[in-house]
Image (cartoon, helix red, strand yellow):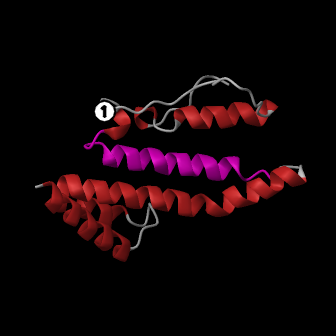
Amino acid sequence: MGGFLFYPYAWGSDEITVYSIASHGGIANMQDFGFQYRVHSASISGANNLYKDKADAWYLQKQWYQSFLRKQPASPNDLVFWDLINNGIDWFFNDRYKNMMKKDFRDNGLKVFHYWVKQRHKYQLSFRDILFYFLLGLKQRSRLI
């Protein structure tokens, strides 16, 4: 397939590569792990200063998923799952952005508010969502102080 798809800091590259491979030959179920994802304190996935890059990576992933899901499966069983995934993709990524905003506001306060307001249309966020998660992030920030 030419290797992993590139996303900032490789966020999402593993899972998209797995889906791409599976689309060519299906998925097999086995007792042992084929791969395992690990999160730890030094992991870049948990870095508090890369929210903009992560948001861009998720935006690219969403575009990939939407493109990937354009082709309807032939199997009626697969069609049920395809429909569920296809109809939930906007909610899934919107939820990711909201949780990330909350953490970003908690860690960085007002200095990132303008970024999220400016990018709200790209990430399909309402101003109300941004304001809500800004206040929620500040509330969590005050608990840390």
Q: Quadrant of the C terminus?
A: bottom left
Mark 1 lies on a secondary structure that is: loop
Q: Nearer the viewer, residue 101 or 137?
A: 137
**Is residue 65 one of those drawn in magenta?**
yes
Task: Give the residue type that dot 1 points to.
Answer: Ser
Direction from residue 89 to residue 56 in the image, left or right: left
Q: Nearer the viewer, residue 39 or 15?
A: 39
Direction from residue 11 to residue 132 in the image, left or right: left
Q: Nearer the viewer, residue 140 or 20?
A: 140
Q: In the picture, residue 114 is in which quadrant?
A: bottom left
User: Residue at (48%, 61%) from the top-left corner?
Assistant: 94
Q: Quadrant of the N terminus?
A: top right
User: Residue at (75%, 54%) from the top-left corner?
Assistant: 82
Q: Residue 71 at x, y = what percent? A: 78, 50
User: Most prominent secondary structure in the magenta stretch?
Assistant: helix
Direction from residue 35 to residue 83 in the image, left or right: right
User: Residue at (71%, 26%) from the top-left corner?
Assistant: 31
**Where does the magenta region start and end?**
47-72
Q: Residue 96 at x, y = what percent? A: 45, 55
How many callouts does the rendering have?
A: 1
Q: Nearer the viewer, residue 145 or 91?
A: 145
Q: Residue 121 at x, y = what percent? A: 43, 66
User: Residue at (63%, 25%) from the top-left corner?
Assistant: 33
Residue position for label 1 = 41
Q: Residue 2 at x, y = what percent? A: 63, 22
Above or below, comparing residue 139 to residue 71 in the picture: below
